[in-house]
Image (cartoon, rainbow, N blue to C red):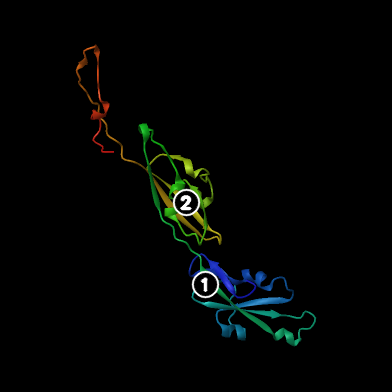
Amino acid sequence: PNADGDVVVCSNPATFDFSTLSTQIINGNPNFSVAYYETANDALTGTNPLVGLVSVNSATVYHYAISYTDPANPNNPINSCKNFGEINFVDGAITVNNAEISMCNNNNAGTAVFDLTSVATPMYDDPAVPVTRKYYPTIADLTNGTNEITAPYAYTSGAPGIVYVLFTTQQGCTAVGEIALNFFPAVVTEEAVMDRCFIPANPVTALFNLDQAQITNDPG
């Protein structure tokens, strides 16, 4: 931030290097430097500067002091002037849900086509914090960014199985969810026998109502 502002972090508390903000704060002005402090009193006195990686949290208001150094006159009184500002950390972590998709194992093929995007909303639904989603067949692929599933709306897979989803916010915060892939229970069928009287006009034929054949006890 060039002035007081919020910095999004992906955990709370988080580890942060304040020097990554210096370029934005100085905004290209030559001969300026920035130091960071945990309290306003430290900023005023120039004591206990925060250097390197430090632990920060969203409950504490942090402070910075901008100083100018006259390269031509180290004794210039303006060198002792400071401008102060505040930095707040905002927790940008997101929470996602796991989901399950079930499909038919038609003809006992052992595979089905799953629409992984069909559970996008149940897994994460916060329009205020948009995310991108990437799908991977294994957690190792997700970690390494390899073998991404590029057609998640038509993913052919056996079952049971798991697909891993990487959610990423615009600020770079991430979360991982799982989609369990399953088959619906198999429908148990049996052969049925139907007996009917022949049609007198055509003795080699009969009239059968196939809807009455009892081939399964499945109510569906």
As drawn, 133 above or below 213: below
> Which of label 1 and label 2 is nearer to you?
2
As drawn, 181 above or below 54: above
Q: Which residue is mark 2?
A: 165
Q: Which secondary structure lies at badge 1?
A: strand
Residue at 27 percent of width and 26 percent of height = 210
Q: CA distance from mark 1 to mark 2?
A: 29 Å
Q: Position of residue 192 (x, y in %)?
A: 23, 26
Q: Dot 2: within a 10 Å radius of its alpha carbon, few (fewer than 14), some, or many (20 or more) residues?
A: many
Quarter of the picture containing the N terminus is: bottom right
Q: Which residue is mark 1?
A: 55
User: Of callouts 1 and 2, which one flags the residue occurring earlier in the amino acid sequence?
Assistant: 1
Q: So how many labels did they put on this image?
A: 2
Residue 99 badge = none
Q: Position of residue 176 (x, y in %)?
A: 46, 55
As drawn, 55 above or below 138: below
137 to the left or right of 204: right
